[in-house]
Image: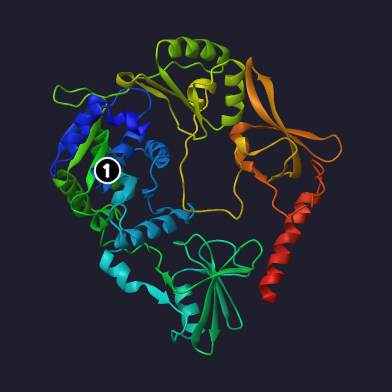
Amino acid sequence: MLDLFRKDPSVDQILTLLSHPEAKAELHREGGGGLGPLLALLYQELKKPILFLSSSEEKARGIFGDASLFIKETRFFPARELLPTQDSLSEGERLWILEELLRDKNLFIFSTVFSVLTPTRSPESLEKLHLELKPGIRLPLSELAATLESWHFQRTDPVTSKNEFAVRGGIVDLFAPSHEEPYRIEWYGDEVDTIRKFNPGSQRSTEKILSLKLFPPELEEAKEALLLDYLSKETLVIQESPLFWKEEVRRLEEEFPHTFLPEQVHRFFSWIENQPALKLQSVASESGLRWPFQPVLDFNHRFRDFLSEAEKELNRGQQISIYTRQASRIREVLQENHLEKIDVLPLPLSQGFSLPSQHLQIYTDHELFGRVVISSPSRRHAASRPVAVEELQEGDIVVHTSHGVASFQGLVPIDVEGRIEDYLALSFAGSDKLYVPLEEMVQVERYVGPEGKIPPLSKLGGQEWKNAKRRTRQAAKQIAGDL
């Protein structure tokens, strides 16, 4: 797709203008998709760090998800939680990105005005306060435990979540907010002997590592810096609807007067003013660049109508691609209707568009089934991951997080208020069946167990699955104690 973008005259004009070190440009963004892939191309071609800013986290995350399908250097920088009722998971994500920016500034950061204005520690402070562990280093175990407690880690056993640590004899288990996996550190006297990763589910040690760098979490009193202090001077700032920013900042100053300080706000806007920039405006201007994309038709569950229209467009020389979570099933339908020329990609692009100059049409689940899928990658990973429809075959053993072990029986079309929608058919013990909407697939995971062993199916509505989960956690704690 991105190769065709490069051939479009409007895209070429955008790239040429933004290649200048002090570029200032406006782009009138019209309806439909295309922005995420376009931003991915800008990053590839310009070879410079980029900051995408919006006043809306929902918009920023959606575009971040689309761009992340095409490039791996994207990161989403969230706001530090300011209310005690909010969870602390985003703190680890902020910390990880700040630490990464100390090493590599050539990233594509997506964020919001709220997130960027949320204060953090300065780069100098963060670098100075870090703790690096290596085998052979002299550091009493009690000293590390005291440091973790001062960093507000919760002492618990076993360690299964971020910001937790446990001490057992000469071993410390810890799960730092800036890391994907927990670590097990073993001492010999007052010296660190070994450092290994471990699985939080089984509690068993895995890969041995040579060093571990830990950073203190962001504390409420850390107000000396902003994200912009970690960014390169050549960073291109892509501003989504900047006309709304000042109203957003005024609201933040009123709601959190001790967090969003006037001098920091002034410094933020001064920095923005001096950076190379591309403003994405909803109102066209005479001097603005031309938006290269146009919307495609919305079929909203009328798949037969789409097939008919697609056949006509292919005969007119159009190139059609479908980005979907239901790739295998859509390929089957296209083959049955002799429309194999349509490319089908198992990527959850959020919205379709057309690129008229290259005779390209892109469709997604949004246009075909009336469902918007926002793919927002995160560095947080669970012990097991949700499975995609195209990865499952009839008869596969799966686990529903609330109901237990089941057998996947395929996709079943069900009439919902006059619309035909696909549901996952799950078969449980006896004749019990459960139909799961595709929107709730995050609750379904592939069963992972000993090779060749098929587990018994759970009884739908029974207590066995809840008891099994309770026993698993107790067993994990016992294993951790044995280790």
Provide residue 262's location: percent of width, then percent of height.
21, 51
Q: Is residue 255 visible?
A: no
Where disc 1 sits, the SS reads helix
- Of the 4 image quadrants, the one containing the N terminus is top left
- Of the 4 image quadrants, the one containing the C terminus is bottom right
Q: Is residue 28 visible?
A: yes
Return the residue nearer the eye: 98 or 447: 447
| Residue visible at 77% across and 52% down in the picture | 452
Which residue carries the number 1 mark? Answer: 249
| Residue visible at 64% across and 67% down in the picture | 203
Residue 139's place in the image compared with 250, above or below, is below
Provide residue 8's location: percent of width, then percent of height.
27, 25
Looking at the rendered structure, the kind of residue marked 1 is: Val
Residue 88's place in the image compared with 270, above or below, is below
Left-right relation of 471 to 297: right
Q: Quadrant of residue 161?
A: bottom right
Left-right relation of 447 to 300: right
- Neighbor class of circle 1 (other Cα within 10 Å; few <14, some 14-19, many 20+) is some
